[in-house]
Image (spheres, grey):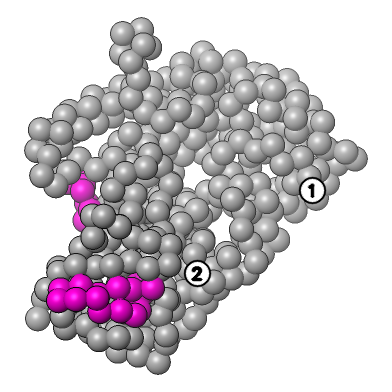
Amino acid sequence: MTARAADRARYDRATAHLDAPLALVDLDAFDANAEDLVRRAGGKPIRVASKSVRCRTLLERVLARDGFAGIMSFTLAESLWLARSGFDDILLAYPSADRTAFAELAADPKLAAAVTVMVDDVSQLDLIDGARGEGREVIRVCLELDTALKFLGGRVRVGALRSPLHSPAQVADVARAVARRPGFKVVGIMAYEGHIAGVGDAVAGRPFRSRAIRLMQATARRELAERRAAVVRAVRAVVPDLEYVNGGGTGSVQHTAAEDAVTEIAAGSGLYVPRLFDNYTSFSGRPAALFAQPVVRRPGVGIVTVLGGGYPASGAAGPDRLPVPYLPEGLRYDPQEGPGEVQTPLLGSPADDLLIGDKVWFRHAKAGELCERFDVLHLVAGDAVTATVPTYRGEGQTFL
């Protein structure tokens, strides 16, 4: 029996009493992935990206481990909810225009001490000040650096379109503007190198593309390491008591951790290991988050149909944004239909061994987004469900 077949047998036994659709997290795999992230971080603390987990129980589980400290959140409303739930070190990874939440933040000493907001434009400070109302708490601010690799005077760029702050001088100018402004304090710098951390460099069947990606990433790592160090020096000249410099992502943990200027690493997807993280030479993880759909039809030889399953991930539309049939091995989509909202035909010889009511296990393309489809996660250890816990959605929280 292959390792994957053994996993399927475990998951089927663990959930035999449960009807699909359902989602599970394999705690053995989750914990092993957490341990691997800590190893790769080389002693630098890992700030957990909540959007890649979206379950308070699992956030608490990973933060209880040595090597993890703090949360990187994705909306201001989520940040306040987490702070009220007892988490006390929350870095909001994206700028916000939530005036109601800013008013709450500025009026509550506990929230203001726990939450740091992201800024890359002075006009964002104007929005916050306009939303304060009577709140006069000091707002903790993190500045985001654009990590993109640029060629030909900026006419060619590789990297996400995020912050407009690219040079040390630009970041230092905004740091000075924040420092001069009453009611704000710069406490950190963040730089997410998505073109390194979030792009696989071993694309199946694409050797030339894979080599080109590895060359680009090696060049980008060198350029960013030099520029990030210069940015940190420039900002520390303005803010000597800077608390942290955050960088990285699941795909680049060990490379970013090697930079002296970086004090902490951000990671989250590496806990669940969705399918987009199968194509990396720098690490390999164990798939920990899966969902099951029930077989409801057998249209013909080598074909079964499962209920639902069309859960595409965010990003540029394409086959890599679709979930993949994972267990039993050997199933594939009908190219004329793909995964559907209400039904998904699956082709392949393993279909002939599946009965009505059997479960087919899938992996989502991205971490965290799966939790927007399910109210609960069934936590599996060995071949038993040890707990059933709510996702954000299950707690009535849908932040985006």
The mark found on residue 374 in the picture is 2
Q: Earlier in the sequence, mark 2 or mark 1?
A: 1
Q: State the image coordinates of residue 384 (x, y, percent, origin top left).
A: 35, 88
**Disc 2 or disc 1, which is closer to the eye?**
2
Q: Mark 1: which amino acid?
A: Glu
The mark found on residue 219 in the picture is none
Q: State the image coordinates of residue 100 (x, y, percent, origin top left).
A: 78, 45
Residue 27 sits in quarter: bottom left
User: How many numbered markers are drawn?
Assistant: 2
Question: Alpha-carbon distance for marks 2 and 1?
Answer: 29 Å
Labelled pair 2, 1 in contact (Cβ < 8 Å): no
Residue at x-position 24% and y-position 68%: 346
Which residue is identified by label 1?
A: 104
Q: Mark 2: which amino acid?
A: Phe
Give left or right: position of 41 versus 216: right
Residue 136 sits in quarter: top right
Residue at x-position 40% and y-position 92%: 17
Give left or right: position of 335 versus 30: left
Give left or right: position of 314 versus 240: left
Report the front residue among 353 and 235: 353
199 to 79, vertically: above or below? above
> Which residues, given as a range, are shown in magenta?
278-307
Most extreme residue toward the right is 134
**Residue 286 appearing in the image:** no
Give left or right: position of 159 versus 117: left
Residue at x-position 31% and y-position 63%: 363
Q: Magenta segment: does it hold 7?
A: no
